[in-house]
Every structure is written in structure tokens, then in C-alpha cells.
Image (spheres, rainbow, N blue to C red):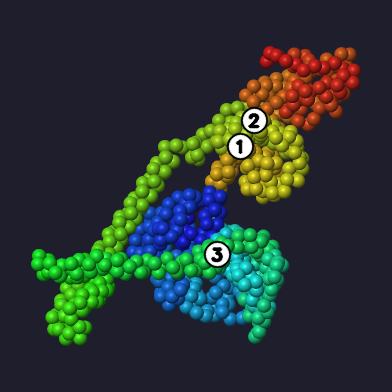
Amino acid sequence: MDVLLVGGASSLMNAMIDKLNKEGHRIYVLTEHRFRSPQNRKVFEYYYFPYDSDCLKEVFESINPQLILCMGAFDINYDWTDTRKESVRYSLGITNILTAFAAREKGRLVYLSSDEVYGDSYTVNITEDTPASARGFRAMVLAQMEQQCKNYSRQMDIDAVVLRLDHLYAVPRKARDCTHIGAKMCIEGLKSGKISASDRYQLSMLHLQDAVDFIYQVCACESHQKPLYNLSSSKMISQMEIAQILRDTLGGDTEIEDNSVGSVHRVVLSNEAFASEFHQSIRHEPQETFAQMATYMKKHRNAFLTADGVSDNFLNRFLGKSASLFWALLPFAENLICFIPFFMLNNRATDSKYFAKLDFYLLYVLLFAIVHGQQQATFSALLSILGYVFRQMYNRSGFEVLMDYNTYVWIAQLFIIGLIVGYMKDRLNVMQEENRQEMHYMEGRLDDISDINTSNAKMKNLLADQIINEEDSLGKVYEVTSRLNNYEPEEVLFYAADIVAKLMGSKDVAIYTIANRSYARLYSSTSTQARVMGKSIQYTEMDDLSEALKERRVYINKKLDERYPMMAYAIYSEDEMQLILMVWGLPWERMTLAQADTLSVISDLIQNAVLRANRYLEALEDRRYISGTPIMEEESFTKLVRAYLAAQTQGLTECALVAIDTGEFAIEEAAVKVRGVFRQTDYLGEMNGKLYLLLSNATEQDAGFVLERIRKLEMDAHVQKGIDL
């Protein structure tokens, strides 16, 4: 299905992208910032729009997603430094998303909230019915958006569900990922050698991968019973227990500073409602994960000591502040350096009859007013005044200079012209910046329009390709599988393997027939790789494979276990397993739900031809065998041998035809004597007045054992080659 993720590129977002991609879904991402959110190659298309944008409805219509997953409380596009301002922006964005989704009237919206909505302490686990006790603007707006989602779901009849995650944690890979309590305590231990903790602060935590699995269950289910679920481990752990795990792992001189004062603060979400409906349980324990986290952060301690990943020492702090100070003082240094040549020029021009009237100080002030604006114009004017007074004191006293009204007229002229030109320069800079921002905004809008157009063109081309290339269409699948009806009953299973191989795009397909309730025997295969499990398997001992077959669902080898096929599916007849189809040669990217559905459809279509052939052979059981003997009559046996030899020629099976010289024994008597020599899957028959044994899935080397046993019965036997049928 098409899935739209709304949020920034956080650890949770990336983990959800990986999960959805593995399950074969097409992923779109809506985020606010083009440059702060690095692109993931597993995402089909990115959209960069503010969440409160008017064009959100058009974006939803363009994508037409079956699922919208809003990161909500875990969206890193929101900076909660100014909680009052960000609370307003957050509520506007989520409300606009809900409104745009409600206008579509189809699909499902999943909103992620957090345990922050509970600020009080609770003696029992918190259920979904427990009212929120938010403290602070962030917690309050999260609780309001939870209620907003439930109101939209109830009043506008849309499928919106809220998932409340309990103290999410994972092993951080970067400093920006250190947001949960365990990571913060570990950083504290790395910096100071002390970890502050309290045994009165008790909580439950949810690992990132468990959260992803739980979220996907809600996203992929056909229906759900509640509008709100708590996702939690429901296993309580105290802050002191976390500190002890970190101390034991960090080692050295790390100490725990006991801050256990006041009453117990306990916040543990109950996941009973989710677990009872979706039958999911956690796979990661905090103790093991926190030990791994402390080991990793200790090894890469320099990357975690500051938010920017740079070691927080005196030298780095000094260099950082020195760089800022340098760029701030650079224009003033430039001004001082340029003052020197203008001071010298003014002194030389004073005694010149040609340049005496030229005011170099005024030119100097105008230069910096034009280049840098009012601030540097003021500073250059002050330097010019000092230079002017210093030069006048060559011939007059300082008191005379200060009492001369011409001095003040010159100063006023200098400041008026300098400040006016500097003000005009500053205004020009402001106008240029406004124009630049407007151009950037318009370019962004143009890029957005181009992105939408590119996405629409890509979708159009994709759909056109799907229409033109009908290899995966149901009509094409039915056309290919219906060819089995043209084969003889004895040939159906051989060519069924070949058809599955062509439709699944794999060269390695095997079909096993059920021998009893525990074992299955290889009937046909398309390659040596497909026969790697052997000619007889005990499928009931194959854990996940056996469980999937019993539940009548497609087995997908997600662990890439080399012992098992990439996909497998069982064909049933009246609640009895008849066949197992195994597909080996599939690349990882094609092991998707769509491919699993294709195998299921192919198997169901093949089932009709297989069951028809089996019922036909069962109905003719009496006619196929000589009465009272295990010997197939000549016509039936000849058809069977012809079918096996033709399939062997095409590489779909292996077989050996053994000719038996009965000697002094009659054919019926010889058949009784050799009955214990061959397997249930082998066939004994008569052709041209002679007795033959057809060994299925056996080579000439395998036939050697059978020949020895027959010879011990005082009869001769050999492998028949080149028989004319």
C-alpha cells in the first residue's frame, strides 16, 4: 500500500521507513525542511511543505495514501526551546493534517503521542481510559492533539488512531539521538564520573524496534477496536536500576549519586489492550540494551560529549568563541587600517594649493558608509574627528580648536552626510534581503510545484508500465496456470513447478508431496538449488516454516536462513496438506507482501489442476493396477514412464527405469517378492510382457542399491536406457 510519513528524519522515522520498505510498501515523506532532513533512498518521493500549508489537501490527493503515519510527539521538525510559540505551531500543523485527511474520507491516520501526557504519579499501570494529567505546554498540547484525533474520528467518521509510546529508548548513534533518560545519564557519567539517580523515580520503557513492530501491526491491520492504544513493555524499572547498569558497564571511577528524596513518582503505561488484540510482546529488555548503549558510548565518548559531536574541552570552547569574536571585529580592524592612509593624505593635502580644499576625511566616511552602513560610518567619523583635531593642534592649542565654530560645522557635516548615506545603505541591504527571501520563497514554491508534477508524472508512467507489462496481472497468471489443464494427470505436478518458476521470476522451485503427517517427498524441481533440502524432509521440525504452512499463510524467510527457501506455501485439500511449494532463488528486495500474495494466488490456481488430476487418478485406481497385485497395467504405466522421462529431459525431475528379469518366477509372483524393495513413491508396472520398476527422484547411482536387493531375491535387474515408448 502507499504510506505517507509526516515528520523529520529521526531514528524512529528511519526505522519505520526500513520496516515499511521490507514489507513491500511504497513510502512517501512529508516534511517541512528540505535541507535539515536528509533523503532516504528507500523513500519513493519527498514533499517539502509546512504542516499548516493550504496545499496539504492537494498533496494528499496527489499521493492518495492508504495510510498516513504522523510522527507527532517524535517529529524533530519542532524546536521546543520556546514552548509557548511552538505549542501554537504544533497544534495548527496537526489540526491542518487532520482536516486535510478528513476531506479524503478514506484510508487511516495514525498519530504518535508519548507518555508525557501523564505528569502525576500512579500506583497502578495507566490504561487508555485514564485521564491525562499534563504538566507544561508541550505535554498539554500533546494531550489536546490526542483528544483532537479522537474527536475527528468520532464526529467525522474517519479512521484515526492514537498510539501513545512509553519512554522510547534505543542505542544512540549520534549525540542528537540522546533524548531518553538512559542516554542522558550515560552522558552525565562520561562527563563528570557521577550519575545522579533516584530509586523513587519508576517508569517502564519501550525499545525502538519493539515500538516499530507494534506501530506496524496497527498500520497493517484490517480493523481495530479502539481509537487509542498504549504501546509499552509494562515492566517497571527505576532510575537507580538504570544507573547501576550504566555504572557497571562504564567501570572506572564512575559513581552513583543517590538523589532519592520525596515521594515515589511512578508512570507505567499498560499495554494490555494492545497485547490482547494484536498478540504482540516485547523482544528487547532494558537491562541488556542499556549495557550495550554504555559500551558503545564509552567507545565513542568524544562524539557524545556535546550536541555537535565535538569534545567539550577548554581549547575547543576557546577556539569557537575566538572565531566568533574575530569575524565581529574584522570590520573595525579594516576601518582602522584604512584610516592610516587617509590621515596621511589629509596631512599632505593641507599644505597643497591644489588639494587644500579636498576633504579626505569626508571621502573616508562616505566610503565606509557606502560599503558597511551606519555603524562603520559612525566609527569612521569618530576616527576622522580625532585625526582632524590632532592635525589642527600642530598650529593651535586644543582650547582654540574646541572654541572654533568651524570645527563643529565640519563635524556636523561629517556626521550628517555619513549617517544619511549609511542609513540608505542599510535600507538598501534590508530591501535586498527581503527581495532575496521573496525570491527564495517563490523558487521554493516553484520547486514544490515541479516536485508535485514530477511525482504525478512518475506515478502516471508507473501505472502505464503496469498496464503495458501484464506479467504480474491476475489475467496473465490465470492464463499461464490454466495451461495445466492441457496436460495428462501424470504430468501436472512436473509442469506446475515450471509454471511457478516462470510466474515468480525464479529459476529454483521445488514441489514436495506429503508422505504422511511429518514427512514430505520431493516430486519435481527446476534446478539443483531447489533440491538442496533433499529428497525427503521432516517439515514438522522446521519451526517458522512449519508454523506458517499449518496456518495456511506464505512463509517468508526474513532471517535469510540458508537452510530454508525464500518463500513457501502449502496446498490443502479438505483440511489435509497435499503439496508444499518452495521458491529459493528470490532476491531480498522481492521478498515482499506483494510477492507473497502472488505466490498465494498462483498456488490457489494450481490447486484446481492438481486436485483434479489426483481425483482422476484415484477414480481410475482399480483400472490402473492389475487386480490383486501392485503392478500397474501396461497402458497406465507407459503413460507414467513417458511423463517422467519427458520431465527428466526438461530438468524437472530425476528418475531411473529398472528392468527386472523374473527368471523362473511368474510376473505376479515376482511383483510380490520385490514389493519390499521399492518406496511408496516408486511404481511397478508391466510393459511388453516384462516387469519394470520406475524409481522417482532417483539417479542411476541411487538405483544401484535397488539392483543389489533384487539380485538377492534370485532375479536379475538392470537400468533400462533408450526404451522406445
Label 3 SS: loop
Whether tag 1 and tag 2 are in contact, CB under 8 A, the answer is: yes
* In the image: residue 57, left or right of residue 399: right
Which residue shows up at 78% across the image and 25% down it? Answer: 702
Residue that badge 2 annotates: 527
Q: Amino acid at mark 3?
A: Ser
Badge 1 crowding class, 10 Å Cα cut-off, few under 14, some 14 to 19, many 20 or more, is some
Residue that badge 3 annotates: 311
**Quarter of the view holding residue 91:** bottom left
Q: Nearer the viewer, residue 394 or 338?
A: 394
Q: Nearer the viewer, residue 583 or 318?
A: 318
Image location of residue 140, percent across then percent down: 49, 77
**Quarter of the view holding residue 35:** bottom left
Q: Which mark is residue 585?
A: 1
Q: Is residue 93 above or below residue 635?
A: below
Whether tag 2 and tag 3 are in contact, CB under 8 A, the answer is: no
Badge 3 crowding class, 10 Å Cα cut-off, few under 14, some 14 to 19, many 20 or more, is some
